Image (cartoon, rainbow, N blue to C red):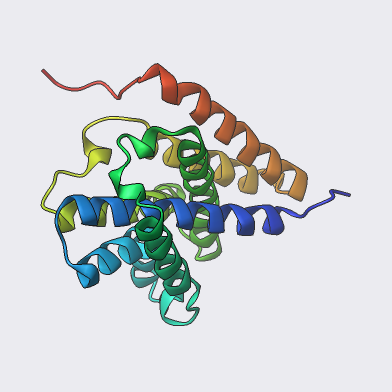
Amino acid sequence: MTLFSAIDILLWADWCGMIAFALSGVLVGIRNDLDIIGVFLVSMLTASGGGMLRDVMLGVTPDVLINPRVFYIVISVMALTIIFKLHRHSNLERRAWFVISDTVGLIAFSITGAFVGMEAGLHFFGVLIIAFITATGGGIIRDILVNSVPFLLKGGFHGTFALCVAAIMFSLEKWSLITDEIVIGVFLLAVIARLWVYPKQWYVPKIK
């Protein structure tokens, strides 16, 4: 019996991820000279856009319209950013605490997205798409809103990790190997792998 269930771990990871994504949206909004409403919208969509897209694709009322937690998170993050002038710090997104929070959120969203896809009865590629959208959709929306090519499409392994985690979860489900211990193990290993890869600055190959 595990001390914490997989649901508990993923719930805390979701919160951690939403805070990191919300901060990312706030920083991007401020750096692009948006007004307060613009910064709020960019931050909110960065934190919850992936889940919103996922729910719409599956014909479900987006959780953000039912549960106000993302609004409280974004308002709190905006307030703390302004109070502590976080937007004036260069390379804040490369700080260890931010990278860890971002990684935890990315993997948690990938796993929850995969579960949602499997519960909806989707096939293998459908599950991969739903997990990918859940984990990376917010960042894509953020970049599009400020008229920038999504970072996800230019390099890094955000999308790759989301797809790999989803593939692993789908395979484990097909083999009836899903347990709290297995899910927590996949989560921890994926987080460790992403943190190990991040400082190496590896990128998905590009066509020259």
Q: Indicate whether 71 appears above or below 89.
A: below
| Depth check, front residue: 29 or 52 | 29
The quadrant of the rendering that contains the C terminus is top left
| Depth check, front residue: 157 or 126 | 157
Answer with left or right where residue 106 lies relative to residue 57.
right
Answer whether residue 51 is visible to the viewer in this image.
Answer: no
Q: Residue at x 19, y 22 (%)?
A: 206
- Percent from the top left, x then y, of residue 89? 33, 40
| Depth check, front residue: 126 or 114 | 114
Q: Residue at x 21, y 44 (%)?
A: 150
Q: Indicate whether 125 appears above or below 193.
A: below
Quadrant of the rendered image containing residue 92:
top left
Answer with left or right where residue 190 lies relative to residue 50.
right
Quadrant of the rendered image containing residue 115:
bottom right
Q: Residue at x 39, y 33 (%)?
A: 94
Answer with left or right where residue 195 lies relative to residue 42.
right
Q: Indicate whether 160 appears above or below 60.
A: above
- Percent from the top left, x then y, of residue 128? 42, 47
Q: Residue at x 62, y 41 (%)?
A: 187
